[in-house]
Structures are given as C-alpha cells and as structure tokens.
Amino acid sequence: MTLFDELSRVWNGGAGRESAVAALKSERAGMLDAMRRTLDTPKTVGLEAMFAHADALDSMLRDLFAFACATGNVRDRLALVAVGGYGRRELAPFSDVDILFLFDAETPEIRDAVALITSLLWDAGLKVGASARTPAECVVEARRDFSVRTNLLESRIICGDGALFDDFCRLYNGLRAENGGADFVEAKLEERARRYRRMGQSKYMLEPNVKEGRGGLRDLHLLFWLAKYLYGVTDMIDWTRSGILSPVACHKFLKAHRFLATVRCHLHLLNNKAGDILTFDAQQKIAGIMGYFDRTGQAAVERFMKRYYLISKTVGELSGQVIVAVTDAIKGENIVRTLSETTDFYLTNDRLAFKDHMHFNEDPLVLLRAFVWRQRLKKSLNPRALQLISDNAKLIRRARGSTKARDLFFEILLSDNPETALRQMTETGVLGCLIPEFQNIVAQVQFDLYHVYTTDEHTLKTIGFLSETPADKTPQSRLALYLGALLHDIGKGLGGDHARKGAALCEKISADLKLDSDVSETLVWLVAHHLMMSQTAFRRDIFDPKTVADFVAVVQSPERLKLLYALTVADIKAVGANVYNSFKAKLLDDLYTFALEKMQGADGRARELTPAQTALAARAAERKYAFSVSTDAERLVTEFIVLAPDRDGLFAEITGAMALEDVSVVEAQIATLENGMALDTFLIQETTILNERKPLDSEKKIARLQSKIEHADAAEIEQKLSAKRAKTPASVLWCPPRVFINNAASDSCTLIEINGTDCVGFLHAVTHAMTQLNLNIVSAHVYTYGSRIVDVFYVTGGDGEKITGGDKIQQIKTALLDT
C-alpha cells in the first residue's frame, strides 16, 4: 500500500488527522532508519546518503501532495517545488525542509491544501520552511531579498504543474541576467564576511562548525551558487568547460564535498537532531564510525581531525580561486602591469601572477621568489598563482639544501608582517617541503579546551604577534627569534616533552639550513626552554629569591631574556582570544624585571600590592573579611580579591563557596602578608544555563558569594560538593591527575604541583586535603588551561619547615590523588 493509499484510507475512514500524522511519522522514521543503515559502514559517502534521503522525501511529498489535492478537490494549477539545500538534494538527516508552492492564483482550495500539507509535515516532526506564491511574486521577492533569491536558485520541481514551474524558471532567469549578476555576487560575499566574523575567521578552530565555519560546507555552497547564478552550470563537467575550475580542482572540490557531507550526516545522527558543531565528544565518536584507528603516536581522533583541517584548507584554496575569477569577470576588465624589478611576475588586477613562460621544473626557486615579491611589493598573490605553487610545491625539495633557497626563505620570514605569506606557504605545501619537520604539525589537533587552533595555525599566529613586542624588550637576534617562533612547537605529536624533542629537531634543521653556530645555538636553546618563562611566572613565587636565581641561571644573558620574553608573550597571545591578560602580563613583566636586575647585581624585591589590593588592605580593619570586585567584560572575567586573617582551611573554604555558586576559578594567586593577613586574588567566571562562561557581574550573585565565604562551614561545603560532583558527568577530555613534590625550587617551602582535568570543586578538594594533612599554604599559583588545571602550592608542615620525610611525602601524594 502506498502512502497515498494509507492517508486516504485513514482520513476517509474516519480515523482523521491523528492517524494521518502517525502514518507520516512512520514514513519519516523509515527514512531515517534507511539513512542510518546506509551510513553504518566506514566507506559510505554522506553526499550519496543525502541524495537518497532527498529522493525518499520527494516520494513522501508526492503522495502527500496528491492526497491533499484530492481531499481538498484542488482543480487549479499548483506545483510543489523543492528549494534551498533540499532543492539541490543535499538533505542531511535533520535539515530544514524548504518547499515552495507555485500557483496562478491562490484559491480557497489551494490555501487549504497548502495549510494541510505544511501542518501535517510539522506534526510529523519535520522542520518545514514553506512559502506559497505566483511565479511573478517569487521574482519580486527574490529581487528584494538575496536570501530568497539564493533559495530559489536551487529550485527543483517535485510534483504538480510542470508548465507553471517553467514559467517561474523563465522569469527567474531573466532576473539572473540583470546587471551581469554583480549585485548577487556582492551580496553573497558580504554575507560570507558576516558569517566569518560570527563563526571565527580561522579554518582551524578546534571545535569547527561543519556547515557555517570557514572552510566548511557553506563555502562550497557559495561556489555552487556563483557558478549557477552567473554561468547557469550545475555539473562539474560544465565547471571545467566554463573555466571556473580546472579538472584537478574539480576533483578536489568533490572530495571535500563528500567528506564534509559525511561528517555532517554523522553529526546529525549522533545527536539525533540538527546541529553542526563538531565537538570534542563528537570528534571521537565520528572518527571511529568513519573507520579511523589509532597509530603509533597518533590517536584515531587526531588522524580524523587532521583530515578535516586539510579538507578545510582545500576548500579555502578553491574558494579563493573561484571568487577572484568571478569578481574579475564581473568587472569586465583585466588590468595588466609589468614589473621592472622582476621578469618572473607581473600584476593582473593588482595581484601578483606568474609569467606564462614559467618552467617550474627548471627553476623551482621561483616558487619561493613568488612569496619574496609578495612581501616586497605588498601585493597579494593571484589565486591561479597560488594554485600553480600548490601543484608544483614538491619541486622545492630539490632546492632544499641550497643557500639560495635558505636566503629567500629568511627574507620572507624577516619581512614586515610575514604571517599571511607563511600561512600561504603552509597551505600550498611549500613550507613543509622546505622544512619537512614542519609538515608534521600541519593541521595537527591540540586536543584540549585551552588551545583554540591547530598547532600550525597557532604557530603562525605566534609569529604575527611578535611584532607587538615593546621596543625595549625586542632582541637583536631577530633570525633566531623568528625561527624559534616558527619551530617552537615542532616537537608536538612525537610523544613526551615536546620542547626537548623540538630542540633536538632544531639541531637537524639548523644543519639543513646551514645556520651560523651562534644562531643555531640560540635557536636550539630557545625552543628547548620556550615554556620556562611562563611556567616560572605562573607556577612559582617570583618574589622568592631562589625562583629568580634559578631562572637567571638558565637564561644567563639579557639578550636571551629578551628572546624568551618576546616568544613567551606571543605564544600565549596566539593560544586564543582573552588568554593573555593583565594578570599574566604583570607576572611576566615582573619576572623580566627581577631577572634583569639579578643579572645586573641587584637584590630581590619585596612583594608589592596592586592599587586594588592596597585599597582593600586599608579597609581590612573594618571587618573580618574585605572584598574587592571588578569586572573585565573584554576578557570575560571578574577579579575577586579577598583579604582576611590567615588561618588553616581559609583558601579551601573560599574555593568551596565558589564551587557551590557555580563560579569557576580561571586563575588565582594567594599570599600571606607580613601582618598575617591572607591576600587571595582570583579571576573568576560563572557558567550559564547554556554552559557558557561569563564574568560574574550580577551584584546579587556577588553579594551571595561574599556572604557564603564569610559564613563558610567546612563540613557543609564538603557535603554539598559531594552531592554536586555525583550529578556532574565526566569530561570527554578527562585525564588522570598527577602530583609532583619539589624540595629544590625554594629554600623555605616545599612545592606541590597538581595537574589534571578541571571538575566541580577541584581546587577546593585539593586545598581541603592539605588542611587535613596539616599543611600550611604559604602561596598558591592556580591556572586553568581549557579543560586542564595546573595548581602549584608553596607549603610548609605544621612546624613551619619544608616537608622532607619520605613517608610524609608519599602520604601527601596518596591523599591528593584520592581527592
């Protein structure tokens, strides 16, 4: 029995609407089950599954259309048309279904039939976007609204009056012919720019949006729209005939489209609803579904995401080529200008292009010279030139050991604003061919919630931020600095200490590049120690003279101090927005100053209070607790300072109260002043219902937190936090906690470093355990790196001395690991 027969039977038999909806739901469930079965094998391509899904929906809508017309006695001309993504048959499992009803005139019978069809579809669980218009009304609306014009561009008749659809197509094609399509192209490019600003400018976000993100499906759709609107082509063969893309580029396009469509289908089915964010949790699951498996040194999810980012890179390349070609064609002119400085290149529409006679096999260095001239002339490379570079990048390997290749590369690296040129060298494969070790970090996932970008993108952004180094802290060794920035994370993905392994790789790279011995030595040192300044500033008490002395013993010279400072600041800024802040800047600047003074023979400094801390200290006598609260909306944090008489368990009670109020500690510094007052400074955020982090800026919530701290009861906090933890699911990025105890870093205190996955009440749990162990917390340095937390405590025993007994140290480790 067909769906039409079933709908007619239940409707006419008196069962009515409820049974009709049940029949449609059953049909819909069958379609989703079929899609799940189709996608159940690793080799299945989502694009074909989408086509089959759209075809199945076509069949369902034909029966529903026939049923509604028969039931409503529709005799007038009416057509049902698929538009938008459904129109191009690209229908993900839970995508919106966009349809258009075409008619000559809207009669009561047509109005009732349209209402019946759309309401039944909604009741059956489909998210339907429906419009009902005459062909002429469609064109009027399309002329006014570019989103409507785009939706109608992908129209496809499902059933009904074909002549009516032909009328619509004729009118719409007339609209397409107006002004050569310039207004459409301008509107779509403006729309793309808004989307990039909304979704993030980088293709290498660690939780990308498969549909709307840069390098995602929507960028491919844009190319479809431009090709169809301007040239009327829909088939890849027509694309090559029209000169839109080369056959090789069309093949890349199809591979990218198939991969991204497959990922999107799996995302929908995994979540059992529409949604296009490729979360860490989804990444792990989809990697397995698509047949990726672990290899030595690389997890399945990392291999899957590397493939994802390489596909996004391809989409970016193709987008650039098509968009430039289209915009130049619309302008209807090609302004060519020769260059007196070089015979290899010329300018076409103010973009750098290769001369037609170039023979890359004979002169592979011209691929590097393209980027040299890009930087010298401050002109972008023509997309065709970038494609030629990408196609011939492997030829660079033949010139890799030459001093000419090295010198060209150094000129690019040390030019003004080299970030974009280096990114293009990375995306075309030139940089990986010149420095093979760099290729290992291209599209490499940093599987945490701290780094926002892939390793290579983070590296390129680090170089971009180097130009912001203050003049008085800018080192003279620019080559060592920029090479250090380019290679500082090159050891990632090799397992173990990436700084040490990266330094070892840099010894080989130095030989390959024939670096002078002093540059080579500095480069290797810088990569080996690129984490040291941040670790010292953020995890050690820089007012402890031994901390500064140990730091200076490794750094040794003001020039190396400048190198390390410049790289450290740029490295932190490149992690993501708001990661570098005044809190971190002050610690790094203080460490820089203390180290420089130590090198010049000065003694250490006493701890100085910030203006906010000084003002708070003046009010401390008024009450047992004094608070200072200020919000930094730009950094999405609230600075929360507590001044109170120091006592055992104080820090644990403060952090416990914060955990109960759903307040997250992003960073914390605590110290005990000479007058016996505890000065605890926190950067905090609250978690919203949507699991988003924001500053704690509600006066009511701040007052409640202050009250909870002032009236804290340790036993009550423990009881409530235990219940709260039991209800909280484990993080997908969970890793086991580790405890390190260090008696060498301070003359007067034992250092306890704890790192692991952040969770409800983590900071309270470890400090409460220390209180139970009769440990006195002299100072603390707390930082959250995405999902990972690193806490360092300077402690003494109950006697005020360092912890030295082996049994006691083991007892501390065991107790902290059990929290």
Image (tube, helix red, strand yellow):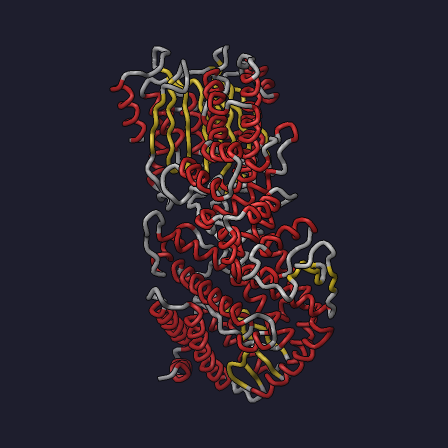
The residue furthest left is 807
Q: Is residue 748 left or right of residue 483?
A: left
Q: Position of residue 444 (x, y in %)?
A: 44, 49
Q: Position of residue 383 (x, y in %)?
A: 61, 61
Q: Is 242 drawn above or below residue 596 in the view shown?
A: below
Number of marks in picture: 0
Q: Is 540 drawn above or below residue 696 in the view shown?
A: above
Can see residue 229? yes
Which quarter of the rendering shows the N terminus?
A: bottom left
Residue at 44% across, 45% down = 446
Choose between 585 and 113: the one closer to the eye. Answer: 585
Q: Is 219 drawn above or below residue 177 in the view shown?
A: above
Choose between 474 and 604: the one closer to the eye. Answer: 474
Can see residue 690? no
Q: Position of residue 337 (x, y in %)?
A: 74, 61
Q: Position of residue 443 (x, y in %)?
A: 47, 51
Choose between 359 and 674: the one closer to the eye. Answer: 359
Residue 808, located in which quarter of the rendered image? top left
Q: Is 87 drawn above or below residue 646 in the view shown?
A: below
Which quarter of the rendering shows the C terminus?
A: top left
Choose between 59 and 540: the one closer to the eye. Answer: 540
Residue at 38% across, 33% down = 755
